[in-house]
Image (cartoon, helix red, strand yellow):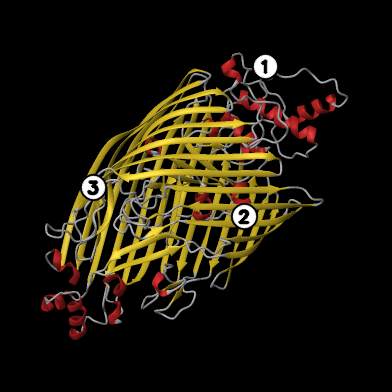
């Protein structure tokens, strides 16, 4: 009930009063023991169709209990309500999970009779989810746009902790997992590769509204552990109007649980697991919440701490180093959130986040070597770190809500690769360590003002600023070779390089540094006009200005084809524009929503941080790209709200998209604008709750993403003709999830069954023969809750032990050979986890 009170101020006091009465009545009739405080919940006039007072002998007792639960207070309907326990900067999905009373009048025409209307509930209904996709709290089922919200309950019941777990069951989303923290998220087919390239990603990743996207090549793709998350919102379709750059395909917003202001809470989760071809791994995760000041709701302070550690033993054998299970990984992280309710309408949240991952050896396989095998002369370790501090201030008044958000982030990445393999000279057995080290530091800020909910007109407006600095160091050093002319001659002759004297003077094979600064400013606004109760017209947009300034220096032997052994450049590019968003929504009943939407997204251009000149064909800069999205959708509920069906059809025109290419000599990767593409598709999601114990969730996506013009890379690789399907975007994907829970004496058995299918698609536009997908994955969880505090689950993942390819790094080496380093879904895994809850 505390979350119901928290959401009341956001959904509107008048409507919330009706919801609260309905919930309270259900609780009393069922005899459920309630705790918490909703004394501040508004109690405006009763619904027009409220039934007459009961003459039953129990009615007086019910009325008495109802009056204790929801004390009436005369106030304006639009006045916000202060949270009673938790300090939500954003509305909780759990707050809207209770049944809601219908305000829909009885049908009066034959056409109206064909539409579903709210019927008397039998106690089994689908949950309603409140999301903040449009920067204000709204019911997801009445939103003009495609949004999926994965709640904390669903994360727990399915055992989901990372992108690979929950994105793969979301319609329209494809996840290409490479090494931890280094992956590609594709939404609605907006992707040009399955391995991270040198541009901004096409999907924006946010932590509590703080953008985590880098201005150029992604240093880290943050995959924050979902333990104790409030929910994860997945916004499908371009979000350039409200979220800015790098949201061409969509955006993902990770929303942590805010501190509980009045209750001490504790949670521990421990697990152990065994994966095919590996040893035993496991994890330990903990949450602790404690009030610091909680005498009154006007001045309450609480702290919430989360910590976790996960060890994943390796399952890939490196035949080159002789190490079995070489790709061991460890992830350590945590966060602290300090929540302060200064007054009824003002809340402050200060938080810090850290997550770091260590990988002993890159986790790709070479299929020709056998099952779960790779080769390199030395291990290829990875590491990445994310540090974030953010401040949220939210003040609610009679005139609206003011929100201020500021964040500072520090991300680092370090990769050490086998340079001999990259150059195609592994047969020489020469150790050439290739190091790629990078760091991004920067801050972001946003202020916005949100009008109160209104029957006729609502609006919001804001401004944002971001400035991030990204530094790279790429080094291919041959320290053991530098003073040995004979060995240098061997290496250089294998690369068909004959200028030995100049090469010896270089002293190194390749060193490069890059310094990129990318300030971005924007103004945004959105307004909704409601000419009637059934129609909404929304229009808005974002005006942006950005700049990308780059300084690079390249030295060494491999720079010679560009005109010397020491090349420097200093470049600056800027861009500005406007991203519109327009939608029309028709709500014939509370259970049906139809909408049409047009939106635009964009992504920053940037530098090619490799040596360029007029002869090697590498452009110094690649230009920004943009998408235009046209969408028709419907969201409906049927059979007394036990069945929900969402269907969306869309068409996306992708202009000037960049593609990662290789220079004709095979030495360097770079970006080049490849042309245009068109993506058409249909997304369908179905949720059903036929009985109280069972919930079914299914998704089905059809995609047709193709080039609309021929593309010739001019680097020796085959051209991609018009009509070629974009990589990482299978024609068909679908998923099925069945969740079950029922009472059995003093224990509560729980069941989760998850099935995913991903069709086949190319891993790269230049390597169409290297495919990913075309596999089924089956997961199952079976457990028991003992009271409300202890639960034990047995689980199995990838039960059929598929070897599905999820991503590939495809290269043509300097010697002309082709290499495909393929990343697989995790092999079959069995495990057990134990959870203890206190005060939750």
Q: Which label belongs to residue 287? A: 2
Q: Is residue 131 above or below residue 160?
A: above
Q: Local crowd at mark 3 within 10 Å, few (<14), some, or many (≥20)? A: some
Residue identifier under label 3: 710
In the rendered structure, the answer to whether residue 480 lies left or right of residue 758 reads left
| CA gap, disc 3 and disc 2 | 54 Å
Badge 1 density bin: few <14, some 14–19, many ≥20, Cα 10 Å: few
What label does residue 48 carry, if any? 1
* Residue at the image position 58 percent from the left and 60 percent from the top: 797
Coordinates of residue 225 in the picture (x, y in percent): 53, 55
In the picture as drawn, the residue positioned furthest to the right comes out as 57
Name the front one of labels 3 and 1. Answer: 3
**Mark 2 falls on what kind of element?**
strand
Q: Camera-side residue: 736 or 379? A: 736
Which of the two discs, 3 and 2, sits closer to the camera?
Answer: 3
- Could you say which is closer to the camera, residue 678 or residue 670? 678
First in residue order: circle 2 vs circle 1: 1
Give the Cα distance between marks 3 and 1: 63 Å
Q: Earlier in the sequence, mark 3 or mark 1?
A: 1
Instruction: Give the left or right position of residue 437, taking residue 512 as reference.
Output: right
Q: Position of residue 284 (x, y in %)?
A: 60, 63
Sequence-earlier tag: 3 or 2: 2
Residue in view at x 32 percent, y 68 percent: 819
Of circles 2 and 1, the one toward us is: 1
Residue 421 appears in the rendering: yes
x then y, percent, for residue 714: 19, 56
Labels 3 & 1 near each other (Cβ < 8 A) = no
Question: Would you say 624 lies left or right of 793 here?
Answer: left
């Amino acid at each position: 009930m505390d979350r119901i009170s928290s959401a009341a101020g956001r959904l509107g006091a008048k409507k919330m009063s009706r919801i609260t009465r309905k919930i309270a009545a259900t609780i009393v009739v069922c005899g459920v023991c309630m705790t918490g405080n909703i004394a501040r919940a508004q109690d405006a006039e009763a619904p027009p169709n409220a039934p007459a007072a009961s003459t039953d002998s129990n009615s007086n007792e019910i009325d008495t209990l109802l009056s204790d639960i929801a004390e009436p207070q005369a106030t304006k309907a639009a006045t916000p309500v202060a949270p009673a326990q938790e300090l939500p900067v954003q509305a909780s999905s759990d707050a809207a999970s209770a049944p809601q009373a219908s305000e829909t009048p009885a049908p009066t025409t034959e056409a109206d009779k064909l539409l579903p209307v709210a019927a008397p509930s039998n106690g089994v209904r689908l949950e309603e989810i409140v999301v903040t996709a449009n920067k204000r709290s709204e019911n997801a089922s009445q939103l003009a746009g495609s949004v999926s919200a994965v709640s904390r309950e669903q994360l727990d019941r399915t055992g989901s902790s990372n992108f690979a777990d929950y994105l793969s069951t979301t319609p329209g989303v494809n996840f290409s997992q490479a090494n931890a923290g280094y992956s590609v998220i594709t939404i609605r087919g907006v992707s040009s590769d399955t391995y991270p390239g040198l541009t901004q990603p096409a999907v924006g990743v946010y932590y509590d509204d703080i953008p985590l996207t880098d201005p150029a090549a992604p240093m880290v793709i943050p995959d924050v552990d979902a333990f104790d998350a409030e929910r994860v919102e997945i916004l499908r379709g371009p979000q350039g109007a409200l979220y800015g750059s790098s949201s061409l395909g969509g955006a993902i917003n990770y929303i942590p649980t805010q501190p509980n202001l009045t209750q001490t809470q504790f949670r521990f989760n421990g697990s152990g697991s065994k994966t095919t071809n590996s040893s035993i791994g496991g994890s330990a995760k903990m949450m602790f919440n404690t009030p610091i000041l909680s005498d009154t709701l006007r001045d309450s302070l609480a702290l919430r701490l989360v910590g976790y550690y996960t060890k994943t033993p390796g399952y890939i054998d490196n035949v080159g180093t002789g190490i079995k299970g070489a790709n061991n990984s460890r992830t350590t992280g945590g966060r602290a959130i300090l929540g302060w309710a200064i007054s009824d309408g003002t809340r402050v949240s200060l938080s810090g986040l850290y997550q770091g991952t260590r990988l002993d050896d890159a986790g790709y396989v070479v299929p020709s070597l056998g099952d779960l095998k790779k080769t390199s002369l030395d291990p290829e370790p990875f590491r990445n770190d994310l540090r974030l501090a953010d401040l949220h201030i939210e003040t609610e008044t009679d005139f609206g809500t003011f929100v201020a958000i500021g964040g500072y982030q520090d991300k680092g990445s370090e990769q050490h690769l086998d340079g001999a393999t990259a150059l195609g000279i592994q047969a020489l057995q020469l150790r050439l360590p290739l190091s790629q080290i990078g760091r991004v530091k920067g801050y972001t800020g946003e202020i916005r003002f949100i009008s109160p909910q209104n029957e006729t007109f609502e609006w919001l407006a804001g401004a944002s600023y971001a400035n991030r600095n990204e530094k790279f160091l790429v080094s291919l050093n041959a320290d053991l070779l530098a003073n040995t002319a004979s060995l240098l001659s061997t290496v250089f002759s294998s690369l068909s390089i004959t200028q030995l004297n100049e090469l010896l003077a270089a002293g190194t094979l390749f060193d490069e540094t890059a310094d990129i600064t990318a300030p971005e400013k924007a103004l945004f606004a959105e307004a909704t006009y409601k000419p009637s109760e059934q129609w909404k017209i929304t229009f808005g947009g974002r005006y942006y200005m950005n700049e990308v300034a780059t300084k690079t220096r390249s030295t060494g032997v491999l720079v010679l084809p560009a005109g010397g052994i020491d090349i420097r450049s200093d470049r600056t590019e800027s861009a500005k524009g406007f991203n519109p968003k327009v939608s029309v929504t028709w709500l014939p009943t509370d259970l049906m929503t139809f909408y049409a939407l047009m939106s635009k997204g964009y992504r920053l251009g940037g530098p090619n941080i490799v040596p360029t000149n007029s002869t090697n064909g590498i452009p110094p800069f690649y230009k920004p790209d943009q998408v235009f999205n046209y969408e028709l959708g419907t969201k409906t509920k049927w059979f007394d709200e036990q069945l929900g069906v969402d269907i969306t059809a869309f068409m996306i025109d992708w202009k000037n998209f960049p593609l990662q290419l290789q220079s004709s000599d095979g030495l360097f990767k770079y970006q080049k604008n490849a042309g245009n593409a068109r993506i058409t598709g249909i997304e369908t999601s179905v949720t059903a709750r036929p009985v109280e114990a069972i919930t079914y969730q299914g998704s089905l996506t059809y995609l047709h993403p193709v080039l609309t013009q021929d593309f010739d890379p001019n680097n020796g690789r085959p051209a991609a003709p018009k009509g070629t399907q974009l990589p990482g975007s299978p024609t068909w994907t679908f998923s099925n999830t069945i969740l079950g829970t029922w009472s059995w004496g003093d224990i509560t058995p729980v069941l989760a069954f998850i099935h995913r299918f991903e069709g086949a698609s190319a891993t790269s536009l230049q390597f169409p023969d290297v495919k990913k997908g075309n596999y089924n994955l089956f997961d199952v969880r079976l457990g028991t809750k003992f009271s409300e505090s202890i639960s034990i689950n047995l689980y199995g993942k990838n039960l059929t032990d598929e070897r599905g390819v999820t991503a590939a790094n495809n290269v043509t080496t300097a010697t002309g050979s082709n290499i495909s380093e393929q990343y697989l879904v995790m092999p079959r895994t069995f495990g057990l986890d134990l959870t203890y809850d206190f005060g939750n």
